[in-house]
Each structure stands twice: as structure tokens, then as C-alpha cells.
Amino acid sequence: MAMVISKEGSSYRTPGAVMLINPDGEAIGMVSGGCLEADVVRRSRQVMSNNTPRYIEYDMIDDESFAAELGIGCRGKIGVFVQPLTIECHQLLGLMQHELKLGRECYLLQHYDAALEAQSSSLKLLDQQQQLLAKLGDDFEAPEFNKNQQHEFVRQDNLCWSLTRFTPAINLAVFGGGVDARPLVAMASILGWKINLIDHRPAYASRRFFPAADVVIKKDPDSLAREGLVIDAAVVLTHNMHLDAGWIKWLFASEELPQYIGLLGPYERKQRILDLLPELERACLERHIRGPVGMDLGGELPESIALAILADMHAVLNNGSGQQLSSLNENILTQVNLS
């Protein structure tokens, strides 16, 4: 297992990125944009042969470094920890997977000496309250961390601590099983999201049309129970105003609203659906429902619409701005020049 545990400056992947390599050199996952993976595989063979973890630093800032010789172009530095997947490590990662499947965040705390290329592995798995669940290797004391951050790195001389937060897969509920829902479910599945496709109409809620959905639920708003159904994001696209209104009412009756609620259709249609819900506070609905749903990416085919919806949803759930990256860089340069 190769894991990015530190970063300075620009890099393709951030700390927490994981890559798994088997003895044949086959790999899944990435620690960079495809630039360093071949070298990581080469180094992993050494780790497997002597069963000793290694800390590897790729310095793209130093023009005379190995990473710079690859012509990567990023002006940053990343630290990658490569360790053999022993039985104990496999058990620890299995426990981590169990926590994530239950919808609970967890943390991996890595401790290493940056001055040592080959070293023993010291790893702790913490629950969402940062209480110890399991440990691997020597015990160690760690400084205080801010658990609200995705990653935190602390270095004191050569001693380093890297804490990475892992979050469960996003739970997406798609209300409506029409043709335009099919690419939406397929694309969300590629992102690794857990998908509930919900539609009481037998001709729509069919596993044949949605093989990538985790669950296909044939229920209407009056019969679907909320217990056990976790929803981080929802999109309503039944193409029936009364059904759409019923599902919105169902969502807003929950104690905890999803982070994202999208409604397909033009703004005028959204207003007509809201008019069907006089018992709900209109201002609250206006504030939480994103309708028309999606970003203005152009295109009118179901695949284009699905891409626009998922792009907007992904930005909201991951605190992205939704702006073009080139525009963000231009704004940064403008601010620097003005100052």
C-alpha cells in the first residue's frame, strides 16, 4: 500500500490518496496524475522483498531531483509511505472499511521518521471521535489535531505525524426512474457513490435499467419509510408535478435535510410545484431546493443533463466553487499583482 501522507506546494493528489500494488506490479488507485506510479511500483517491489516499509519523498521543486527529471511540471513536494500489507495491516484496513460501510468517518494516523528511508510501520486507526480502534507497530504519542480538517501534517525535526480523515461514500437518492435517470445513476456509480433509485411505477423502477444502483426501491412517498435510509444528496425527476411535490414533502419531513436537493425542470415548474405544498414554509423550500438543478454546461441529451447535475452536486458536497480552475488562477494572479 502506497499512501500520500504529506504535501507541499502543487501536486495532483492530496494526502490520503492510496494506491495498492500486487506482486505482479499491477496497481489500483493513484498517488499522482500518472507521473510517479511507475516508480512507486518499482519501489514497492523492494518493500515486498524485504518486508520493510519505506518513506519516499518526491521533490518537484528541486530541479536536480529525480521527480524533476521526469518532467512532471508540478512545483510541489509529496511524501509517500509504502508498506507491505501484512495480515495485521489487512485487519486494520478491514476494520476501517467496516466503519465506512456503517456511515462513520474514521482517521488514519501515521507516524514516521523522515530521515529514515526504511523503517518500521506505525499506524493507528481512530474512530470519528478520534478514539483508538486499532494500531499497528510501535505505540507512539501524537500532537493535538484538528479533526475538522481532511488532513493535517505535523513535523518536529525529522519526526512526522500525518492524520487523514476518511469519509463514507456519498448516499445519493434519485427519485424517478425515467430515461434521463439512467446516465445519472451510471455516472454517480463511477464516482463510487451509493445510489438508491426510488420510483413506485413498475415500468420505471427496474433493475434492468439501473444495474449500477445499489438499491432499487418500488415505493411512493406515502409508503416509503425513512428509517435506515441515509441521504446526503437527492434529485427529484419523476416528470410528474404531483409526484415531485410528494417527494419534496417527504424529504422536508425528515429531521435532517440532505446537503443537496435538486429538482429537474425550469424555474416556472418549480414555482408550480411549490404551490402544491402550502403547508410547508416557502422560504425554506426556496432556500434548500436547487431548481433548475445542475450547472449550465450546454447540451440537452440525458447524458449532458446528468453531467450538469452531478457536477453541481459534486461541487456542493465537496465545498468546491464550481468555477473554472483557469479563472481561479487568473483571480489569484490579479490579487497578487494588485497587492
Image (spheres, helix red, strand yellow):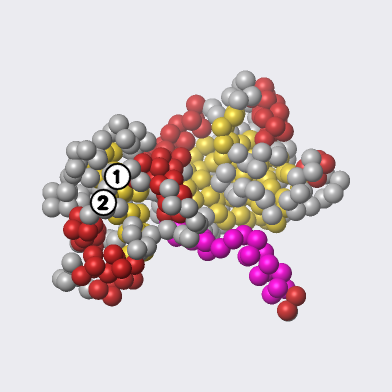
Task: Identify which amino acid the numbered label 1 is placed on.
Answer: Gly
315 in magenta: yes
Magenta highlight range = 312-336
Q: Residue at x 35, y 46 (%)?
A: 180
The answer for how far apart the CA atoms under marks 1 and 2 are is 7 Å
Which of disc 2 and disc 1 is earlier in sequence? 1
Q: Position of residue 307 (x, y in %)?
A: 46, 50
**Residue farthest to the top, as pictured:** 24
Q: Determine the image quadrant of residue 288.
A: bottom left
Q: Which quarter of the image is occupied by the N terminus? A: top right
Task: Identify which amino acid the numbered label 2 is placed on.
Answer: Thr
Q: Which quarter of the image is occupied by the C terminus? A: bottom right
Q: Residue at x 56, y 63 (%)?
A: 323
72 in magenta: no
Figure check: 285 above or below 301: below
Label ID, residue 178: 1
Left or right: where 330 falls relative to 289: right
Figure check: 153 above or below 197: below
Question: In front here: 134 or 103?
Answer: 103
Name the secondary structure under disc 2. loop
Q: Determine the image quadrant of residue 316.
A: bottom left
Label ID, residue 87: none
Residue underneath mark 2: 238
